Amino acid sequence: MADGIHPSSALTAGTDSLARYLDLLSTQQKLVTSNLANADTPGYHTKDIDFQREFMSAVRGQTPETIEPQGLYEKPDGNNVSVDRESRLLSENAIRFNLASTLVRGHLESIRNAIHEGKA
């Protein structure tokens, strides 16, 4: 505590950031699955988020903003969903979720170890 940071504040800050990251992953997952569900809906336009920008906004407590990605091929019926793109995003999201889950487990393990050491 010599640096002015209370140990519980550091634990809470790490947990809060991970929670916001997981919330953002959930938002992106919902958008991707909605895009895939509407892959054959005439006139439907792909919805997404700028993950990097939105993570920084989430850290500041702001809600994610949905965007329509530019440069996607639009079919004659007006739909621009690319099943390949959305499948790639699902895979990326799964990797990010696995990483976040590993970080949460490590964070909880650190807390558990600190508690057990304090009882000795």
Image (cartoon, rainbow, N blue to C red):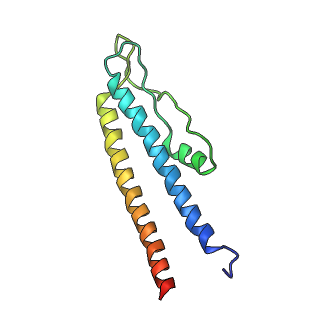
Left or right position of 48 against 16: left
Residue at the limit of the structure toward the top, as seen here: 77
Residue at the limit of the structure toward the front, as seen here: 119
Where is residue 102 shown, x and y percent of the image? Answer: 37, 61
Where is residue 28 shown, x and y percent of the image? Answer: 44, 39
Residue lying at 51% horizontally and 84% vertically, measured from the top left? 118
Look at the picture and state if 6 lies above or below 42. Answer: below
Residue in the foreground of this view, choosing between 81 and 61: 61
Quarter holding the N terminus is bottom right
Look at the picture and state if 100 lies above or below 6. Answer: above
Residue lying at 34% horizontally and 11% vertically, measured from the top left? 76
Residue in the foreground of this view, choosing between 17 and 112: 112
Left or right position of 87 against 56: left
Look at the picture and state if 43 lies above or below 64. Answer: above
Residue in the foreground of this view, choosing between 112 and 33: 112
Residue lying at 66% horizontally and 73% vertically, measured from the top left? 5
Where is residue 52 shown, x and y percent of the image? Answer: 51, 46
Residue lying at 39% horizontally and 13% vertically, measured from the top left? 78
Where is residue 92 shown, x and y percent of the image? Answer: 35, 46
Residue at the limit of the structure toward the bottom, as seen here: 120
Residue in the foreground of this view, choosing between 9 and 48: 9
Look at the picture and state if 66 lies above or below 21. Answer: above
Q: Quadrant of residue 44?
A: top left
- Label count reads 0
